[in-house]
Image (cartoon, helix red, strand yellow):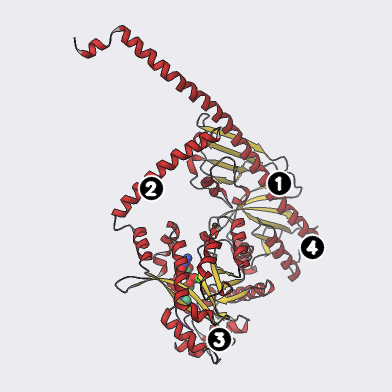
Amino acid sequence: MSFFARGFTRQNVAAIAVGVFVAGAPLIAFNFWLGGIIERQGREDAEISARHAVTHAERRTGDVVRTLDALSSAGVGDCGPNALEALQRAAFETVPIKEIAILDASGRMLCSSQQKVVAAERETMRRVLSTEALEGAPNYALDVVNLPDGQSMVRLRRPLGSGSNAIAALVPAGMFLPHVAVQVFEQHLRDEFNGGVETGPAPGGLYAAVETRGHVVLAEFGRRKPVFTAGDGFAAEHRSRLYGFKVLVWVPSKLASAGGADLKWLSLYVTGVVLALLGLFAGLVARRDPNNPIIEMQRALAAGEFVPYYQPIVDITTGQLRGAEVLVRWKKPDGTLVPPAAFIPLAESSGLIRAMTLDLMKRVSEEAGKAIGERPGLKVSFNFASRLFADESVVKDVYGAFAKSPIKLTQVVLEVTERDPIENFAATRQIIAALQSLGVRIAIDDVGTGHSGLSYMLKLGVDIIKIDKIFIDSIGTDRNSTTIIETLVDLAHNMRMDVVAEGVENFEQVMHLREIGIRAAQGYVFAPPLPGSAFLKLVEAMDALGEKVATAHVVAAA
Ligand code: C2E
Ligand code: CA
Ligand code: CA
């Protein structure tokens, strides 16, 4: 008889069964118990999230309704200058509102808080997807509107006075969803909820949606499954008593927080260890791959291959130098210069942009700090990726970068582009305010080209707007653009902001800009971005300390 055959006697099989039962039962019981806790907690979490989301949507709606009611009583129906100013101010002061417009009986826009012409043009391309009455707000209609760029907007609309006109506010749909239930999710998930959120891949199958009374989905987070099966997670539904909205939340089991903090920490700890191991492994694999562009950029950063170029900004009324915008170049060891468009996007998505920007600040201080510091009137601008404003540690970073520099923080300008969406508006605004309290000034770059719209960006409380080259290019050929520039200049002056014109290429444009009251400009007509040595020579030539002779011609010749 073999050993195995001998092993499986009747007693042995019984003993094994008892052993499995004795060892397994506590494990099963433990799992049951844990399951119960997780189940209860999960249901509560989903419930709290849904209730929180309803309150949030109610608050947003209430703010908009109050603003429109107030404007209506103020009699803004004539689209006159006072009415326009009231629309602009209201759109500016009411956080979720992107734009307020007066519409005629057929729904055509008569005027808006945004620039008249642009808005009117865009209106013809807006698609109204659905319309229904807004419960709880008599006379109000709620439309879901699609902008040409695909952005989904909610429009709240009410009649204006006794006539047939209406007043309407446009709110990005994502504004109706909050940081859903901060209590539920870990910090890394929390970030996903900040600000306007639109449908996209959600962590681990999380889902949240806010629907109207008429079952139109206003905003959603995550992907809706055809069926949410109990056992896979926890669903909660909550309805707004004020406006009839319905919020639906789905928390997958694996995201529901476990009962005890210990369990949470244990799972965090295990996840942390696994992630660290995976990261290490991925790092090792990546390090072996010489073609990995991120690794290559890290190497180049350490080797000092990212160098600042300086494009002068000129006062076109006096010809004096006002400062420069720093534009990064990748100077490869073989001498080739790579333009930023080729590497900035990857630097931003990989997170390397932070180190790169701070390194650039340090290099500018070393190379041009003395010349700039000695001339307190000069300003130096850095392009600042909008994601850098999402983390408050940036305030310390910027402070530190110039702490020992001859360049004072009051000489520093940070440019944030209108092209990038602002992910967390409230945090960005706070961080901008903190930077401003250090003396740093903030500019909006590429104004007129972004998705967000100027009125939205202006709520960040900025100091300077930079008018994009496309508007400058069309000076003399396109009336609309000229009107837009003039309106921007008016707006900027009213709000005590400076204006810089970008991409100025000829003197006809300079003359025109001067006529409409723009003082500062940059572009090839004065100088292209210059390497440090050339820029320093230019500073000496235009702004020699002691003697003050400077004309735009000197710059043009440089
Ligand atoms: P930007 O901030 O809008 O910079 C202006 C761009 O217009 C620069 O291109 C500049 O060389 C170019 N330019 C200036 N005057 C004229 C002109 O008269 N005519 C024409 N056709 N172009 C003109 P550049 O240097 O290639 O930079 C491209 C973009 O890369 C910048 O656009 C900015 O968004 C980004 N960038 C550059 N440096 C940095 C940086 O350090 N950090 C970040 N985050 N982005 C940067
Ligand atoms: Ca810029
Ligand atoms: Ca620009």
What residue sits right under mark 4 in the picture?
A: 75
Residue 269 visible within the image: yes
What residue sits right under mark 3 in the picture?
A: 320
Judge whether 71 appears above or below 367 on screen: above
Determine whether label 1 and label 2 are within 8 Å by CB. no
Provide the major secondary structure of the magenta segment: loop
Distance from Cα at disc 4 to Cα at disc 3: 47 Å
Q: Position of residue 342 (x, y in %)?
A: 39, 66
Determine whether label 2 and label 4 are within 8 Å by CB. no
Dot 1 alpha-carbon crowd within 10 angstroms: few under 14, some 14 to 19, many 20 or more: many
Dot 2 alpha-carbon crowd within 10 angstroms: few under 14, some 14 to 19, many 20 or more: few
Q: Which mark is residue 279?
A: 2
| Residue type for callout 4 | Gly
Element on which disc 1 rests:
loop
Q: Earlier in the sequence, mark 3 or mark 2?
A: 2
What span is in magenta?
Answer: 522-528
What residue sits right under mark 1 in the picture?
A: 134
Judge whether 178 appears above or below 101 on screen: above
Q: Earlier in the sequence, mark 3 or mark 1?
A: 1
Determine whether label 3 and label 2 are within 8 Å by CB. no
> What residue lies at 42% left-to-right and 20% top-to-bottom?
24
Distance from Cα at disc 1 to Cα at disc 4: 22 Å
Q: Earlier in the sequence, mark 2 or mark 4?
A: 4
Locate residue 349 relative to residue 480 in the image: left or right: left
Q: Earlier in the sequence, mark 1 or mark 2?
A: 1
Distance from Cα at disc 1 to Cα at disc 2: 50 Å
Element on which disc 3 rests:
loop
